[in-house]
Amino acid sequence: MERSVYFDGWHKGNFCQHPNLPMRSLHMLDDLERLGATMLVWAGLGGGSISLPFLHHEAFGPVDPRQGMYGYMNDSDFIRECNKRGIKLFSIVFEVQGWEFPAVIDRLTGKIKYINKLAEGHEEQGWYGLREFSQDKYPDAFPTSLKDYYPGGIINSEGEVVGDLFEEAAARKLDGSPVHAQWVEVKNHRQICYQTCRNNPVWRDYLKKIISLMVDAGVPGIQLDEAELPLTAIGSGGCFCKDCMKQFTAWLVERRARGLLGAAWDGIDVASFNYQDHLLANQHTFPQGAPFIRDYWEFQVRAVKKYFGELADHARAYGREKHQREVLVSGNFFNLMPCYFPIVPKVDVIITEMEHTQFRQPYFYRYCEGFAQGRDVVVAENPYGGIVPDLVRMLDEGRGHDLYRIFLLEAAMYGCNMSVPYGGWMGNTIRDAFWPPLHLSAQVQGFLKRNERLYPKGSRGDACVLYSYLSYYWRETATGAGGANAMQQFTNLADITSSGWDGDKRRTPFWEVLKALTDSQVIFDVCMMPDGELREDDFTLAQIQDYPLVILPDCDQLTSRQQDILLRFAQGGGKVLAHGRLAEGSDLVSRLEATGRLTRTQDADHFEVAMARFAAGMRQLMKPLRSVKVSDPRLGVHRFTSKEATSIHLMNYDYDAAADQVRPSLNVQLTCRARGRVQVHSLEGQDLGFRTEQTDEGLRVTLERVPVYAVVEIRHPE
């Protein structure tokens, strides 16, 4: 398991100032060693979206003696020190951001005298950013300039010399205006950030130069932020840049040649079609109510796969050819929505900046683990729409320590790794950064480091939930979903079962089923079934054959290959629980029924009715299959198994707000189908009294008390 740190390092009590991360220092390395860090995310070299010379300065520039006195260093020196300590620093490519900052340029030297805050309102205020770099306006601002990167000038896809990279690279709304990256522009300040478009070859080439500089600086890993670029822009009305329009037209021509365009395109000359012109001429809005919106999304998802892969390949090839070493690649997969699944094969580790961070979301972590398909999953919190602002305030006041422990440990317990916030991002409206008490973070990280054996990879659950990409790809896309569909249901820590669900509008049975399973303390895995186009259909019988039960939540579409595998699974004795629809238009249901191994629970328009039906069928099937039973239904439960041991992890969510602590659960009985010597581990190292007995159901362990977190380890007989 990676022990990651969300290493922004933004300053406490100040706004986060994208994209230039604060300088790194020796005392930070001391903290990282105390945290047992193995990996840093959002960790350095962010300034390329201001200019390449600015990024070169971050990497290699001299350090002012006043800062050097306190151990501050440039990023390449910091990376070297991390490498010495075995800490993998992933530099961050803010690939959706293009910046212009207020600046005052010294008239004599041509160097930047003031930038950003100090330059605002100054009588000599000008600007510095992508525009000035591409115009070579201030060639002496840094040791490098435009000619060092583009000796022949910047040329766009139409063969024109680019005189303003800031405008050239911008994503465009329907009316042609640039799309702003509003989540990073600090309110009431003059800085300007446009969303950029990766479909523009000029911007892709620029991003490759950023990546090359990062590899030159010694980074072991590259992290591509906003990995779904330019889908990022659709919610803001984009992207209608010239390259998106040209590429969409070419895609339509290719689809028509393959007979894959729907009837809505009949009579339209796609070879001369321009989506922007069509929408404007017919006075359509975008994206709401726009014709051909699914076709446009389908085109962009394929562009994401193509161009993310191009940048990932460049990073690896450059590392091998220039520096004779392997460079790791990852990206910000945000909430692991369906648009990210096609690019999973291109990354070494999955980084998710979850959309809504809550105190109880094991279903999301189990999905993440399945989505990653054997890769490590690193989770970072998001300050919007979740617990983070309140938790930060509580920690600042000396409260919420148990809640913070839950925040970190829950991800590990369910197969992922929650990054320790180290000056974590708080958005552009909260004047603060997430600096939790170091001793709390070190306590959790120390436990994980000492007890890695308790979190083995490849452990199999009692059931496997299948995610049908064909069934959910567009359904989740159309609702702006992903894990959000589950997380938006349950937001009240005091009443974990409360629901803000609107059953008539937001039905997503996959997430409902995952939530029901975790509420019922079922130990399960998630397995992804690709669609056969955006991802090769590599689903195999070997992936599910060892499970006693597979669950199919409203899988209305399955490939013929997937249908055959499910039939073979049932014929081999496996049980199948299908909730709602199953492979409509096929005879799979009748073929499965003939095996006698199929149970069906009907979906319903109303959330509570649908889930009551599922829960009843699921509980009956799970009775003989449960490997672990726990007497307190309020506890979160997960099991890991290796050759040497079985470890049962218990999370106590019973937080008492008045006492500001989790109430211990008393006299908890845990029964596990395992044999061996028992040891009980607690986070704080306190002795948790217990007794054991062998019963007909298995080994029963009675715990006198379960605090925030406990692990029952059963060492198998040799």
Image (cartoon, helix red, strand yellow):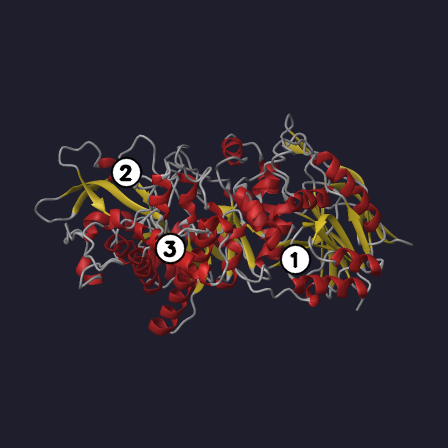
| CB within 8 Å, label 3 to label 2 | no
Q: Are marks 1 and 2 in contact (CB under 8 Å)?
A: no
The C terminus - image quarter? bottom right
- In the drawing, does residue 411 fall left or right of residue 75? right
Q: Quadrant of the N terminus?
A: bottom right
Q: Residue furthest top?
A: 658
Of residues 583 and 111, the one drawn nearer to the viewer in this rendering: 583
Residue displayed at 25% across by 57% down: 156
Task: Give me the C-alpha separation between circle 1 and circle 3.
Answer: 30 Å
Mark 3 or mark 2: name the one nearer the start of the chain: 2
The residue wearing badge 1 is 558
- Give the label, 1 or 3, closer to the camera: 3
Residue 528 horizontal/vertical position (percent): 62, 57
Q: Is residue 20 visible?
A: no
Camera-nearest residue between 354 and 600: 600
Q: Position of residue 133 (x, y in %)?
A: 20, 52
Q: Residue at x 34, y 40 (%)?
A: 281
Check disc 3 and give the amino acid type. Answer: Thr
> From what the image shows, is residue 279 above or below residue 536?
above
The mark closer to the camera, 3 or 2, is: 3
Residue 191's disc is: 2
Residue topped by disc 3: 249
Crowding at dot 2, Cα within 10 Å, few <14 / some 14-19 / many 20+, comes out as many
